Image (cartoon, rainbow, N blue to C red):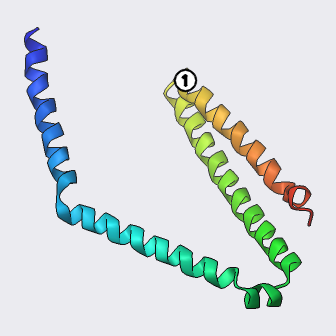
Amino acid sequence: MKLEKDVRPRDRDRRRRVDKFLRRREHRRRFRSVGTVLMLALFVVSALLWSPEVAAAVDTEALWGTIAEIIGTWVTRAAGVGFFVGGVMFGWGWKNEDGDRRGQGINTMIAAAIVGALAGMIGIFFGT
């Protein structure tokens, strides 16, 4: 019982400090300004892309192929990073004789291999 009383005031104090930090006006202003800039950028990009003049001048098949190529490239790279991270997790689990970490590493490597295989078949999904 004595230990619980010692822990609770610390938790309350931490919560108060976090609440005080989040309630500051400066942070709210900063978050609002970032949100406003993102919303404005999204509006400008959508206005440029979906205007009739741009839509008439853009070859949609070429644009679709470019988007498929970019997605395929970056998903393949992300799968490689995931496979690497899984390998590191498996290696550290093997070194420390930690069965849970080895299992997580193998699961991560398998998931990354599946994502990489799907990224290799991106042409099937996009019809390119």
Q: Is residue 54 above or below residue 72?
A: below
- Name the residue that disc number 1 marks: 100
Viewer-nearest residue: 91 or 76:
76
The local secondary structure at tag 1 comes to helix
Q: In which quarter of the image is residue 60?
A: bottom right
> What type is the residue that disc 1 sits on?
Asp
Q: How many marks?
A: 1
- Rendered residue at 62%/81% (across/down): 47
Q: In which quarter of the image is residue 77?
A: bottom right
- Label 1 neighbour load within 10 Å: few <14, some 14-19, many 20+: few
- Rendered residue at 13%/41% (across/down): 16
* Position in image of residue 93 (x %, y %): 54, 30
In the picture, measured across the screen, residue 91 lies left or right of residue 5, that is right
Viewer-nearest residue: 91 or 79:
79
Residue farthest along the top direction in this orientation = 1
Q: In this view, does 119 lie above or below 61?
A: above
In the picture, measured across the screen, residue 49 lies left or right of residue 97, that is right
* Position in image of residue 79 (x %, y %): 69, 51
Viewer-nearest residue: 46 or 118:
46
- Rendered residue at 91%/67% (across/down): 128
- Rendered residue at 73%/64% (across/down): 71
* Position in image of residue 58 (x %, y %): 81, 86
Quadrant location, the N terminus:
top left
Residue farthest along the front direction in this orientation = 52
Q: In which quarter of the image is residue 29?
A: bottom left
